[in-house]
Amino acid sequence: LRQLGGSLARLGGGAAAVSREAVIEVATPAQYAGTVAELLADAGVDAVLAVHAPHRLAQAEACADAVLASAQAAGQAKPVLAAWIGGDEAVAARFAAAGLPSFATGAEAVLGFQHLLRHARLQAELMATPPSADDVPPPDLAQARAIVARALAQERDWLDAGEVSALLAIYRVPELKPVVAPDLEAALVAARPFLSTGRPVALKIVSPDIVHKSDVGGVALDLATEAAIRDAAQRMLARVALERPGARITGLAVQPMAQRAKARELIVGFATDPCFGPVVVFGRGGTAAELIDDSHVALPPLDLGLAGRLIARTRVSRVLAAYRDVPAANLEAVAAAIVAVGQMAVDLPEIRELDLNPLLADETGVIAVDARIMLERRPEQRRRPAIRPYPGTWAKRIALRGGREFEVRPIRPDDEGAIAEMLKKVTPEDLRLRFFAPVKAFSHAFLAHLTQLDYARAMAFVALDEAGEVAGVVRLHADIAHEEAEYAILLRSDMKGLGLGWTLMTLIIEWARAEGLKTIRSQVLAENTRMLALCRQLGFDIANDPDDTAIRIVTLPVEPASPSS
């Protein structure tokens, strides 16, 4: 402390640097002021920690005032923290009154700064624009639901191998598709095309009563001849009959061996939590997955960005990177598999558990070697996702005056760039009418606020023209009681007069009715006659704002949806 007494240190990127100005053990207020100002002006400094150690000749209160003066002169662009060791309440009160955090020790100050960094990182993650997945068409939900419904109608708890493969194909999860044979002779026939090319196969028992096949010797690998398959099947059936005499054997599954020598074994799946609903799991896979205990969870639905962060939280993520002569695994393919599994959890609440273990990953992509899906037959035990999923069922195509067609759908986080481009095509006057003030620039944080919604409390629809550009957007945000909501609408300036505003407004009213909201309201500038005319046509009540004569309050009671709608 004597060496640091009266000195100022930089805290950025894990490094510490003393000011270029020599600060002696008994620093003066002027030295404090000059050093803080110098560090704050340095582009390489992220934050400043001022430390003051007790000393008989030190001017504690005057030095504190000097730090405050320099911090206030520099503005709030960079954090300034203080550690006045042994300082009295008067010094602490000075810092508190100025809104500058102070601590009793240097260690506490560093810990406080770490909390500040963590908060900033989390905020950046929350507002990050996820990668776009526009080129991936949605899964055939009707076909997926039919597969699950058929199994439930037969009062089964597990999907069979063929049904699992069909679901994975619908959600575009690559799989070493097994051929399910009813008996040994059929299994030999299924294996011959692979054996004829020199590719060995795996043989697995198929039973609705055996979840972990390897526990009872129900898996045999690298079988290169028919004799080896016959011998493995006989031993497999004999052991299962001994250890699980009551298990129903419905067949044998034949799979070609993966032949991916440098692939990593992963596990991807989800389970249903009584409180949070479906929870997606990712981590190290294989037969020792439970022993290694390297997995993390996330709440669906997930996008590629969230899936990437889930991967990064595991230790196995390091193995997915390149090392020695092993190329890096295709992380985009791994993330896509996680997103697909999360989407399946959202779309099919009848599924209680899903496991892809192992999911092999290498530089060419991913492939599921083994998969199992357990159903929840009791409707009362099915849980909705804790996070409201993307409401894709509200997407539609509309035709307006002059034959113009638009795609209208709920907004997505990856629409941020498209919204930014739309705002460039809105005149300054239209922006002023929408935001009640001249607006020249829109920050990432502002655009993220517009595009990243909690669909349980808010909704926004975007209208896309023939070129795929945003032509207009309408949004509605409900109060915490989910009874009243405030709307806002903005059209591209070249899209007026087509009836697009009317269409978007009727759609957001329809959504409010479906959500059970009671009232829609907003504030409109009195000079915005076009918007007020639209509100009158839609049945809004229009009243003067008692606090501002330039503003009108528009209110629409929402009729409840009919039972048949």
Image (tube, rainbow, N blue to C red):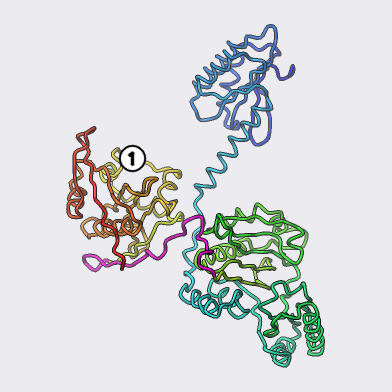
Q: Position of residue 508 (x, y in %)?
A: 31, 56
Q: Nearer the viewer, residue 149 or 555?
A: 149
Position of residue 61 in the picture relative to residue 390 (left or right): right
Q: Is residue 454 above or below residue 220?
A: above
Q: Residue furthest top?
A: 57
Q: Is residue 233 above or below residue 34?
A: below
Residue pointed to by mark 1: 439
| Rendered residue at 44%/51% (across/down) | 454
| Rendered residue at 36%/48% (across/down) | 478
Amino acid type of disc 1? Val
Dividing the picture into quarters, in which one does residue 85 lie?
top right
Q: Position of residue 548 (x, y in %)?
A: 23, 33
Q: Nearer the viewer, residue 339 or 439?
A: 339
Q: Nearer the viewer, residue 347 or 201?
A: 347
Q: Position of residue 396 (x, y in %)?
A: 34, 66
**Picture quarter with the N terminus:** top right
Dividing the picture into quarters, in which one does residue 11 lie?
top right
Q: Position of residue 114 (x, y in %)?
A: 63, 35
| Rendered residue at 32%/47% (across/down) | 484
Magenta stretch: includes residue 310: no
Magenta stretch: includes residue 392: yes
What segment is highlighted magenta in the picture? 378-404
